[in-house]
Image: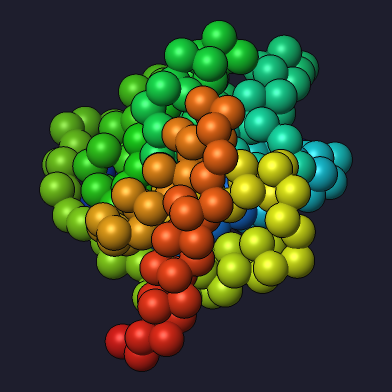
């Protein structure tokens, strides 16, 4: 069911809350990135639903049809492009399909799969978020009249960042195979970029490049693990 179609007049978008009445499905495995999107949706008037993998997103989509889908390109059970390609040809089609990643090299892949746009991480700017959706939304679903651009930055919960780091460490500890390393390197690179954690981002990117080039990376992986342990030992400032 399309949530927009069932809304009452007081749920129509306004210049101050331009996404009022819309439901956004966020397919994102990072709690930190998802919390940023939660805050952006809250500030914009949209409702948010979350799926942390492709399989979970498909279960959501069997029950309802959101107005907007924001899909991370690197998910634990596959590439987000595969889900984008499914949604791009589905009838009825979701109004706005956006891809997101910390690696802008994925933008072309996402657009070829059928994405309407691309949101580069970090996802924390309100004006950028709203514009990316409104520019692709049908005119009858946009707010009437001029719209103020609120150039605000949201601050996701640092506890969510800590949870993401724990997830990455658990994954590395439980599965040292190449697929797990690839996933964790991409996952950490994205969340570190969102948190503006340069040392962690650099360590994760070094592992990712090493894997892509097919070279031995024991020292790089050790360095990444050390940075992870250091972050997890630090107190979480709430």
52 displayed left or right of 231: right
Coloration of the structure image: rainbow
Q: In percent of the image, x 15 and y 42: which residue is there? A: 148
* Quadrant location of the N terminus in the rendered image: top right
Q: Where is residue 37? Give x, y as percent.
A: 43, 54
Residue 190 makes an appearance in the image = no
2 displayed left or right of 222: right
Choose top left, top right, bottom left or bottom right for residue 82. Answer: top right
Q: Where is residue 232? Give x, y as percent.
A: 45, 80
119 displayed left or right of 4: left
Q: Where is residue 55? Give x, y as percent.
A: 81, 44
Q: In percent of the image, x 36 and y 90: which residue is there? A: 235
* Quadrant location of the C terminus in the rendered image: bottom left
Q: In percent of the image, x 66 and y 31: which residue is there? A: 79
Residue 215 makes an appearance in the image = yes
- Vertical arrangement, residue 229 with respect to residue 63, above or below: below
Q: Nearer the viewer, residue 167 or 96?
A: 167
- Vertical arrangement, residue 29 with respect to residue 82, above or below: below
Q: Nearer the viewer, residue 131 or 221?
A: 221
Residue at the outermost bottom position: 235
Q: In percent of the image, x 16 and y 48: which residue is there? A: 150
Q: Where is residue 111? Give x, y as percent.
A: 50, 14
Choose top left, top right, bottom left or bottom right for residue 87. Answer: top right
Choose top left, top right, bottom left or bottom right for residue 5. Answer: top right
Q: Nearer the viewer, residue 92 or 98?
A: 98
């Amino acid at each position: 069911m399309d949530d927009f179609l069932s809304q009452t007049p007081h749920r129509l978008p306004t210049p101050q809350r331009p996404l009022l009445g819309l439901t956004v499905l966020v397919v994102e495995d990072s709690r930190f990135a998802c919390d940023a999107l939660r805050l952006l949706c809250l500030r914009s008037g949209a409702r948010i639903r979350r799926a942390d993998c492709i399989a979970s997103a498909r279960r959501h989509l069997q029950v309802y049809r959101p107005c907007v889908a924001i899909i991370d390109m690197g998910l634990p059970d596959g590439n987000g492009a595969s889900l984008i390609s499914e949604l791009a040809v589905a009838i009825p089609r979701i109004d706005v399909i956006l891809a997101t990643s910390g690696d802008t090299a994925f933008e072309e892949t996402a657009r070829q799969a059928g994405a309407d746009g691309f949101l580069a991480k970090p996802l924390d700017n309100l004006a950028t978020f709203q514009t990316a959706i409104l520019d692709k939304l049908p005119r009858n679903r946009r707010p009437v009249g001029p719209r103020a651009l609120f150039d605000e930055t949201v601050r996701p919960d640092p506890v969510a960042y800590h949870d993401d780091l724990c997830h990455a460490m658990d994954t590395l500890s439980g599965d040292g195979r190449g697929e797990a390393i690839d996933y964790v390197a991409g996952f950490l690179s994205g969340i570190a970029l969102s948190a503006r954690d340069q040392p962690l981002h650099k360590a994760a990117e070094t592992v990712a490049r090493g894997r892509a080039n097919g070279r031995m990376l024991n020292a790089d992986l050790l360095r990444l693990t050390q940075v992870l342990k250091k972050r997890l030992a630090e107190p979480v400032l709430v």
